Amino acid sequence: MARITVEDCLDQVDNRFELVLIAARRARDLALGKEALVPWENDKPTVVALRELAEGRLDHMLQEKYRRPVAPAAPDSPAPAAEADSDSGAAAEPE
């Protein structure tokens, strides 16, 4: 079993949270059939992605694809309960 630590990878990526995002994106690509840049050695895609990062094999990819911003979530629509409250509020006013 390969033993990869966060410290091994932080030499390549400054932020732990960004490290997780980059490794997850690379692992997803590996799982979908992209060619590994290090020997596979019967490891899972996440381990291979972290080994690639630790060995500095993703330098060109770090600047391009894997640092792309995550698409923001769609804004929430108004809750139906808020509309019901406004209707009942008008009827509850004193006459």
Image (cartoon, rainbow, N blue to C red):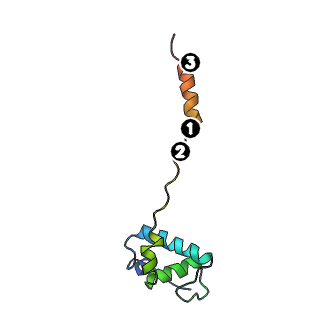
Q: Residue at x 52, y 53 (%)?
A: 73
Give residue 30's quadrant in the image. Answer: bottom right
Where is residue 79? Give x, y as percent: 56, 38
Q: Residue at x 46, y 80 (%)?
A: 58
Which residue of the protein is positioned furthest toward the top in this rendering? Answer: 95
Look at the numbered disc 2 and give the secondary structure of its residue: loop
Q: Real-space Cα distance between discs 2 and 3?
A: 27 Å
What's the amino acid at mark 3? Ala
Q: Mark 2 — residue?
A: 76
What's the amino acid at mark 2? Asp
What's the amino acid at mark 1? Ala
Give residue 59's quadrant in the image. Answer: bottom left
Left or right for 40, reference 19:
right
Contact between marks 1 and 3 (CB within 8 A): the answer is: no
State the residue in front, 89 or 60: 60
Q: Mark 3 — residue?
A: 91
Look at the numbered disc 1 and give the secondary structure of its residue: loop
Where is residue 68? Give x, y as percent: 46, 66
Checking the image for residue 79, the label placed there is 1
Q: Real-space Cα distance between discs 1 and 3?
A: 20 Å
Q: Where is 73 relative to 94, above or below?
A: below
Q: Looking at the image, tell me whether mark 2 or mark 3 is earlier in sequence order.
A: 2
Contact between marks 2 and 1 (CB within 8 A): the answer is: yes
Q: Looking at the image, tell me whether mark 1 or mark 3 is earlier in sequence order.
A: 1
State the residue in front, 7 or 45: 45
Residue 81 visible? The answer is: yes
Q: Residues within 10 Å of mark 2 (few under 14, many from 20)?
A: few
